[in-house]
Amino acid sequence: MKAGFKLPLVTLPLILLGVGFVAYTIAIKPAPEQIKAVERATAVRVITAQKSALAPKAIGFGLVTPARSYQAIPQVSGTAEYVNPMLKKGDILPEGSVLLRLSTRDYNLAIAQAKANIRAGQARLSEISVSGENQQAALEIELEALALKVADLDRVERLFAAGTASQSARDIGKAAHLAQRQKVQNLQSSLALLPTQKLVQTEQIAVYEANLATAQLNLERTELRLPFAARVASVDVEVGQLVVSGKSVAGFDGVNTAEVEAQIPISDLFELLQQDGSKDAVVPLEPSAIASVMTRLGLTATVRLKLGKTMIEWPAALDRISNTIDQRSGTVGAIVRIESAYSSAELGRRPPLTKGMFVEVTLSAKPTSGIIIPRSALRDGQVMIVDEDNRMINRPVVARLVQGDVALITQGVDAGTQIVVSTPVPRIEGMLLQLHPDDALMGALATAGVAK
């Protein structure tokens, strides 16, 4: 067959036959089933908002120190004759215990000498009094003699005027008169000095009595006693050793009360201070002002010591604020007192709070009511909540307190509201959610709350 007849007689009929077959197949085949588009829900973890209370806290760390310490420093010198056998490092001595006795020989001699000086002074005072009486009697005699000399001189003067007495007799009379006057004058001068001599001797006796009192006081100081119950921290004395006044022989740490100066971050103090005012409360940098605010807040303190897996607690009280602020770390020292440092100790269960222990101190203010949520659920002042249609809504809230891993919401969320605690991807306002309650997280948040 020629090529010109091949196209219309063979090829075209085949093409037409194929097109018809395809058209027939399409015509008799049923239409494909259409699948309706359905919105997919995003799985998220949620918690149910519950009303609770959270106590603002500030946590710091510090070393335990005794509230009272004592350095046994003798006020007198001497040889140690007695040293308390319990005066050993680590031992606890009760109040009033005799620590040390020094030799009393030198001080007994000083007392004896002072008493002898007093007796000698008193004897001298008596001597002055007797001497005064004798001089007074002698003065009366000399005055009578002076009267006689005056009468003799008058008689010689009359005779000399009459021309019956010589000039030499007159001169002898005058000389005798002047000599007698001199005797009287000397006695009067001596009597005039007697009050002053008595006063001087009286003051000298007072000096001797002061020396006696000093010697007696020094004798008492030869015995050194412990003013309060304490634990021996250091010892530097032995029997027979020469003890020098002003040099410490032993050091003691009080056992009744302990102190801890915990370094508290200023930011944590700011959270505490917010409980006393508005969000604009400013942290006062003056330690006395901080102490005043903390007292007004009624803070409580707890001291914790971690021993392995065991946490031991002691109740404490905020006593004062340190006078310095660490500029490098931004912390201020809060000093708390523990009254039961030793008295609450239990063998094998609770050790005493001893010097040098590194402990945690927690300051707590009055609890504040609100909704407690995980800190991670708070984003830019908003939380994600679930509406009635299980759709996500970004809700602005007011976080009154943020500490640790939790935040306390006081405005914006009511009790019973479901709060999204996981982050959906993508995060779109109004997206449909598949809810999975996080019971474990709700239990943890419940323990974080304080019911008071």
Image: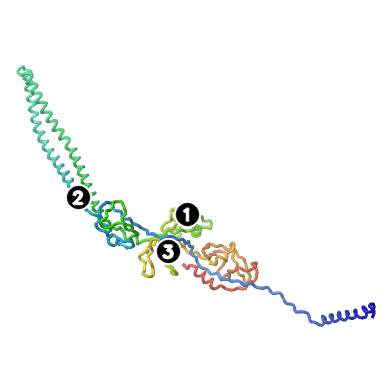
**Of label 3 and label 1, which has the lower sequence position?**
3
| Corner quadrant of residue 233 | bottom left
Going 94% across and 78% down the picture, which residue do you hit?
3
Q: CA distance from mark 1 to mark 2?
A: 57 Å
> Which of 135/81 is in front?
81
Q: Residues within 10 Å of mark 2 (few under 14, many from 20)?
A: few
Q: Residue furthest bottom?
A: 28
Q: Secondary structure beneath disc 1?
A: strand
Task: Indicate the quadrant containing the N terminus: top left, top right, bottom left or bottom right.
Answer: bottom right
- The answer to whether one can see residue 276 in this image is no
| Corner quadrant of residue 26 | bottom right
- The answer to whether one can see residue 287 in this image is yes
Q: Is residue 90 above or below residue 179?
A: below
> Which residue carries the number 3 mark?
303
Tell me the kind of residue under disc 3: Val
Q: Position of residue 166 (x, y in %)?
A: 6, 18
> Which residue carries the number 2 mark?
109
Q: Position of residue 360 (x, y in %)?
A: 44, 63
What sort of colour scheme is used for the picture?
rainbow
Asked whether, in this view, residue 5 is left or right of residue 212, the answer is right
Q: CA distance from mark 3 to mark 2?
A: 55 Å
Going 44% across and 68% down the picture, which residue do you hit?
308
Asked whether, in this view, residue 72 is left or right of residue 162, the answer is right
**Disc marking residue 326:** 1
Q: Position of residue 209 (x, y in %)?
A: 21, 47
Q: Nearer the viewer, mark 3 or mark 1?
A: 1
Tell me the kind of residue under disc 1: Asp
Q: CA distance from mark 3 to mark 1?
A: 22 Å
Q: Secondary structure beneath disc 3?
A: strand
